[in-house]
Image (cartoon, helix red, strand yellow):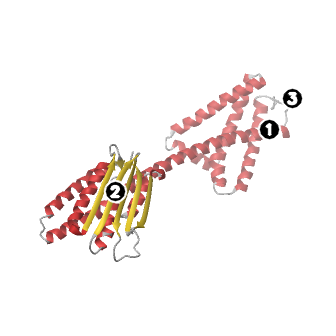
């Protein structure tokens, strides 16, 4: 046997001590051997003859199957050298044919083909064709099982890898929200402290409540929708202090929120964009409408803000750093099935609108 085949088998099974795989192979060939022995014993009506011929034939089956799967296919099929593969496989078949004929003839019976109506004691074309077809059948059967198991194993590994990558990316995207949000809020506090505003303690208290939510709630894959709404309310309260009378906010919440779950910090970026790209760029009065309804297990969340006066051709911002709307889109793609959400963005009546329909039950 080629030294590369021996080295491969040693590295695959013996070196790693992977006896479980060996057990699977032993079980497969044992079951196949018993089945084939009983089948041919019923055909020949001679159990001992069937046992002897299978004791000779099965090592040949196994050798050809392993040579094909672990040597010929990796060397030629996987490298797209199909012509070479056919030549070497046919050569292997011919060698196995000679081995089986001689071993049967000298160790079992001079009639090497007892199922034939005539006595066959020489290497005839009929014997060669039937024997080689039998070898191809066994080798193909074994190869198909091996490839199927490998495909299932690789699919399972790929699925596990995708799940780990999904969790990692979701954690990263959630972590992007927090620094960006705190940066804006700290700027608000800084402005108030410069003005020696009496509102500074209230802002700090609201900020501490938000920090508590971010530290503990966002570690979960899903959070209660009521907690997410309370977080939004705290954020809006902070922004009310910042914009004072120049901002008109209308917020409406309806429907049964019990047992509703949502990815944490998913809605705040949408609300935050209304302030960042609407209120901060408007001169004079501005309006923000927030409407949240839960109907039949789906949340319909709509945020609208006044179009900035200085941006006639203004488009809803998608931040280059992945924060904001692009973050929301990515988190929806990673954390929800396509059938579980709909996100639409449009301009209507001098207002920018973002509508998110999301399965929450």
Q: Nearer the viewer, residue 168 or 243?
A: 243
Q: Nearer the viewer, mark 2 or mark 1?
A: 2
Q: Nearer the viewer, mark 3 or mark 2?
A: 2
In the image, 245: left or right of 16?
left
| Marking on residue 117 | 3
* Mark pair 1, 3: CA separation: 14 Å
| Marking on residue 130 | 1
Looking at marks 2 and 1 on the same chain, the residue that comes earlier in the sequence is marked by 1
Looking at marks 3 and 2 on the same chain, the residue that comes earlier in the sequence is marked by 3
In the image, 293: left or right of 24?
left
Q: Furthest residue to the front? A: 349
> Measured from the top left, where is residue 310 in percent x and y?
34, 77
* Mark pair 2, 1: CA separation: 77 Å
Q: Nearer the viewer, residue 14 or 18?
A: 18
Looking at marks 1 and 3 on the same chain, the residue that comes earlier in the sequence is marked by 3
| Quarter of the image with the C terminus in it | top left
> Measured from the top left, where is residue 94 in percent x and y?
76, 44
In the image, 171: left or right of 202?
right
Q: Nearer the viewer, residue 339 or 10?
A: 339
> Measured from the top left, where is residue 354 in percent x and y?
39, 62
**Residue named by callout 2:** 291
| Quarter of the image with the N terminus in it | top right
In the image, 179: left or right of 60?
left
Q: Quadrant of residue 189?
A: bottom left
Q: Nearer the viewer, residue 206 or 53?
A: 206
Q: Quadrant of residue 99?
A: top right
Q: Residue at x 32, y 69 (%)?
A: 278
Q: Residue at x 33, y 46 (%)?
A: 257
């Amino acid at each position: 046997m080629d030294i590369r085949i021996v080295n491969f088998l040693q590295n695959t099974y013996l070196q790693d001590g992977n006896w479980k795989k060996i057990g699977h192979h032993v079980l497969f060939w044992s079951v196949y051997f018993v089945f084939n022995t009983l089948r041919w014993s019923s055909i020949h009506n001679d159990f001992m003859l069937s046992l002897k011929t299978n004791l000779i034939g099965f090592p040949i089956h196994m050798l050809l199957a392993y040579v094909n799967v672990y040597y010929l296919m990796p060397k030629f099929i996987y490298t797209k050298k199909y012509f070479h593969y056919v030549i070497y496989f046919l050569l292997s078949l011919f060698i196995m044919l000679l081995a089986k004929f001689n071993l049967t003839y000298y160790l079992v019976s001079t009639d090497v083909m007892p199922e034939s109506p005539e006595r066959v004691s020489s290497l005839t074309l009929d014997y060669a064709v039937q024997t080689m077809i039998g070898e191809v059948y066994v080798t193909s059967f074994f190869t198909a099982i091996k490839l199927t198991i490998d495909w299932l194993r690789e699919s399972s590994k790929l699925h596990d890898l995708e799940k780990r990558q999904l969790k990692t990316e979701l954690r990263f995207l959630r972590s992007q929200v927090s620094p960006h949000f705190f940066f804006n809020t700290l700027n608000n506090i800084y402005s108030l402290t410069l003005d020696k505003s009496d509102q500074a303690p209230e802002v700090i208290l609201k900020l501490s409540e938000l920090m508590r939510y971010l530290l503990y709630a966002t570690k979960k894959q899903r959070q209660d929708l009521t907690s997410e709404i309370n977080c939004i309310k705290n954020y809006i309260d902070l922004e009310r202090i910042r914009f004072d009378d120049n901002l008109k906010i209308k917020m409406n919440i309806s429907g049964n929120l019990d047992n509703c779950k949502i990815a944490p910090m998913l809605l705040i970026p949408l609300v935050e964009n209304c302030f960042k790209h609407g209120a901060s760029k408007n001169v004079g009065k501005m309006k923000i409408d927030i409407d949240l309804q839960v109907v039949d297990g789906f949340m319909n969340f709509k945020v609208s803000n006044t179009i900035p006066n200085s941006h006639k051709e203004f488009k809803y911002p998608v931040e280059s750093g992945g924060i904001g709307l692009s973050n929301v889109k990515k988190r929806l793609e990673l954390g929800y099935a396509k059938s579980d959400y709909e996100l639409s963005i449009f301009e209507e009546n001098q207002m920018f609108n973002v509508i998110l329909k999301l399965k929450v039950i």
